[in-house]
Image (spheres, rainbow, N blue to C red):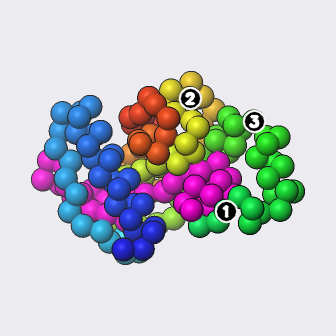
Amino acid sequence: MKQKDNLEFHAVHNFIAEYNSTHGRQLHYLRACIPPMPDTLCQLNRNQIGIEVVHTYGTGVEAALRLGNRKIADFPDKVHRPRRIIPQDIRALNSLDRVLADKATRTYAFAPTWLLVRNALALWSLSDYRRHKKQIHVPDGHPFTQIWFLCDRNSVGPQGIMRLA
């Protein structure tokens, strides 16, 4: 399984566990898909739902480091400078806004499709995002029936889900 597929698989399964726990419903994983389909198909109340998965990391450098694809020594000091200067909340919210804007431009060969954004910025928790929810920009005209945000074991506590749209 490729790294991206593995990340999506675990994100969906963690989301399903949290969704079922908090909503008292039975959302089930059916299968992984390939574009133009959403990343996975799930079932909720006998209806199929597509779930597109995206991760938010803060910066590209943080993503590479978090995924273990690069080491900190691989980046020159000038690349690290923004990580040290730009406040964590700005990096977190800008990253989330970027992935929401990017996914809003996509089309999928399945409806309804939900978007699942998994937090991979280890230093920010669900309570941090909830505190800044009014600053999160969900673009108009996106193709998703629902947009969910997941903070799981990749994040500091508290963990859980938050509906963005």
Task: Tell me the mark number nearer the camera, choosing from 1 and 3.
Answer: 1
Q: Position of residue 98 (x, y in %)?
A: 64, 52
The quadrant the C terminus occupies is top left
State the SS at label 3.
loop
The answer to whether residue 94 is visible is yes
- Magenta region, residue range: 39-68
Q: Mark 1 to mark 3: distance in Å? A: 22 Å
Q: Position of residue 63 (x, y in %)?
A: 61, 57
The residue at which mark 1 appears reads as 71
Queried whether the magenta region covers residue 55, the answer comes back as yes
Task: Tell me the mark number nearer the camera, choosing from 2 and 1.
Answer: 1
Which quadrant holds residue 65? bottom right
Residue farthest along the left direction in this orientation: 46
Name the one closer to the observer, 144 or 38: 38
The residue at which mark 2 appears reads as 128
Give amino acid for label 2.
Asp
The residue at which mark 3 appears reads as 87
Q: Mark 3 to mark 2: distance in Å? A: 13 Å
Specify whether 96 is left or right of 81: left
* Residue at screen point 38% across, 65% down: 6
Between disc 3 and disc 2, whose residue precedes?
A: 3
